[in-house]
Image: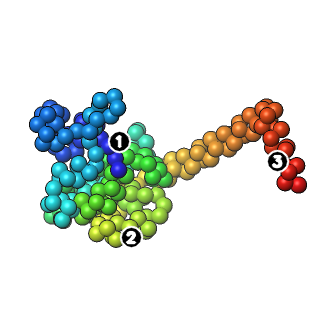
Amino acid sequence: MSNYKPREFAEMIGVSVKTLQRWDKEGKLKAYRTPTDRRYYTHRQYVDYMGDGNTKHGKTVIYTRVSTANQKDDLQNQVAFLKQYANAKGIIVDEIFEDIGSGLNYNRKKWNKLIEDCMLGLVKTVIVAHKDRFIRFGYEWFERFLKSNGVEIIVVNNERASPEQELVNDLISIIHVFSCRIYGLRKYKKQIKGDEDIVKELQDRNKSNS
């Protein structure tokens, strides 16, 4: 589960950092402490604070994503488009998630928080502009997973919010990751060759196995 700094947690629950500090002193919402005495809050505390109303009925959220920071204009276009869609359908949006990261990256902060909220029963509906805004590959699996947790995902299919350049960026990121791994492997092999103790150990193992 995620932990949050006071400023992050304050934004999530809609109060000020000073309010959190006061609540901590009063014992209303106690902060946890790191070994260096820094305050932090847990996702469980977020769930408890949101209360039974969200747990029973769930939120309706908008999820948007772009691959790189220089696509922020497209991110705002997605938000505006989906808010317009929700208004036209009479849907009340409780929260908006804006992510920057590859659709192949499962470590996106906002995406992981959304998945956690879904698993905890806090979310009822997720609205996305296009399937690949949520996840590049394996969308159908995640759709079934969300459904099993009582969450409906609505894909509006706004093609403008899913540029072809996104796919190019994701492919480039795949090539970059594998290139780094290959380079690391080659570097490791060179290191082994330069270390007489490792070479001797490998030779001894080969003799014992033959």
Looking at the image, tell me whether mark 2 or mark 3 is earlier in sequence order. 2
State the residue position of label 3: 205
Q: Give coordinates of residue 143: x percent, y percent.
A: 38, 67
Mark 2 is surrounded, within 10 Å at the Cα level, by few (under 14), some (14 to 19) or many (20 or more) other residues, namely: some
Nearer the observer, 78 or 28: 28
Looking at the image, tell me whether mark 1 or mark 3 is earlier in sequence order. 1
Q: Give coordinates of residue 5: x percent, y percent.
A: 28, 37
**Mark 2 or mark 3, whichever is nearer to me:** 3
- Marks 3 and 2: in contact by CB < 8 Å? no
**Up-down relation of residue 189 to residue 96 (above or below):** above
State the residue position of label 1: 72
Give the spatial CA distance, label 2 vs label 1. Answer: 30 Å
Give the spatial CA distance, label 2 vs label 3. Answer: 48 Å
Q: Amino acid at mark 1?
A: Lys
Give the spatial CA distance, label 1 vs label 3. Answer: 55 Å
Nearer the observer, 149 or 164: 149
Q: Give coordinates of residue 208: x percent, y percent.
A: 85, 51
Q: Residue at x 41, y 48 (%)?
A: 108
Q: Residue at x 34, y 28 (%)?
A: 36
Q: Amino acid at mark 2?
A: Arg
Q: Residue at x 43, y 68 (%)?
A: 140
Mark 3 is surrounded, within 10 Å at the Cα level, by few (under 14), some (14 to 19) or many (20 or more) other residues, namely: few
Quadrant of the frame with the C terminus:
bottom right
Q: Give coordinates of residue 3: x percent, y percent.
A: 32, 43
Q: Residue at x 47, y 50 (%)?
A: 105
State the residue position of label 2: 144
